[in-house]
Image: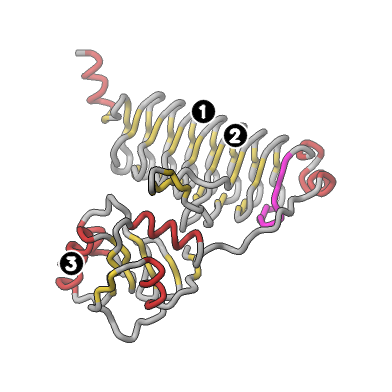
Amino acid sequence: MALPLSLTLPELQVFLRADLEKRGDPALRDPAWLAPFESAGPGDVAVLPRRASPMQIGACRAGVVVGDAGQERSWERMALAGGKAGWFLRVEDPVWALWMLLDKPCRAPQDPEDWLSEQEMVDRFGIQARTATVHRDTEVGSDTWIGPGAVVHPRVRIGEGCRIGEGAVLGAPGFGLVQREGRQWPLPHWAGVWIEPDVWIGPQCQVSAGLLEATFVGKGSRLDAQIQVGHNARIGPGCILAAQTGLAGSVVLGAGCLVGGQVGFADHVVLGANCLVAARSGVTRSWPEGTKLAGFPAIPLGKWRRKVAG
């Protein structure tokens, strides 16, 4: 996903108060979209995150890359070695630059404060949904059950045959902040949530809206009660998550993962398909397909058992 950008390249430079490194393709003057740095293409602007590695920076294919001086050096080495012809906008703080872009030139259309009425909720979803709240700027598939007190924010897409439990909240802004002048500023999260068909979201769950890419829950997944899914997270099809599990931002779970209760995931952790995580574990790093994990920090199950027994 990407957000439309209403600035030309010279206007972008002025808006961000950036130094423009003129090593780019002269034909590219007006990038059209602000996109995630991992998937950005030649017509896009991408802002590098603070923790991006030199390899990730070098792999970025955006026509215009926004980053700081240290990232510029990595980009220059990798870009020259790869023969790329992008432009680099050097800024003091890339996260603040992202906030500026999301707050103004990439601002999503303002959704009217227009929510389905109580009678509309009953007509569409049944009497149990009378106290739920669903915004008109959503897509809800047929045969989807919405429980009392649930809240579905704008830019949420829910597939057919889903179950949204009592008090669940879908599409509230993600918890992304940038510090500036002694104050914490929230990053606007415009990308929403995408729930595929036949997904169960348990009571009191929270699925946060994505920043540039929708937070995603794959087909047939089951989320127990009181689960937190952070912004930009991706849960593959057929996953099962037990109660009080928490996924930080940008966590990726492959298809068929089984996660016990009260498991915590650090941000940007990636689990391959069919992993198993024991209850009350803390997953602080990525693991390949089929790994069984336990403990804090989580380690392979066999190693954890030997550690406990010894």
Q: CA distance from mark 1 to mark 3?
A: 44 Å
Question: For residue 87, what is the image quadrant?
Answer: bottom left
> Which mark, by number, is residue 72?
none
- Judge from the rendering whether residue 303 lies leftward or rightward of residue 27; answer left or right: left
- Residue extending farthest to the top is 310
Disc 2 is placed on an element classified as loop
* Region in magenta: 132-141
The disc, 1 or 3, on the residue closer to the chain's N-terminal end is 3
Q: Which numbered disc, 2 or 3, marks the residue that appears first in the sequence? A: 3
Label 3 environment density (alpha carbons within 10 Å; few <14, some 14–19, many ≥20): some
Label 1, label 2: how far apart the Cα atoms are: 9 Å
Q: Mark 1 = which residue?
A: 243
Query: In this rendering, is residue 56 above or below 296?
Result: below
Residue drawn at point x = 47 percent, y = 40 percent: 239
Alpha-carbon distance for marks 2 and 3? 45 Å
Q: Amino acid at mark 2?
A: Gly
Q: Residues within 10 Å of mark 2 (few under 14, many from 20)?
A: many
Q: Classify residue 310 as left or right of residue 250.
A: left
Q: Nearer the viewer, residue 284 or 30?
A: 30
Of residues 58 and 127, the one drawn nearer to the viewer in this rendering? 58
Q: Is residue 229 above or below residue 9?
A: above
Q: Quadrant of residue 14?
A: bottom left
User: Which quadrant, please, contains the C terminus?
Assistant: top left
Query: Badge 3 is on which residue?
Result: 78
Question: Which residue is outermost to the bottom?
Answer: 27
Give the residue pinned by disc 2: 202
Asked whether, in this view, residue 38 is left or right of residue 3, the answer is left
126 in magenta: no
The residue at 81%/44% (across/down) is 118
Q: Give, as a three-letter code, the residue at label 1.
A: Ala
Q: Picture coordinates of residue 240 (x, y %)?
A: 49, 36
Query: In the picture shown, does residue 180 fall above or below 42?
Result: above
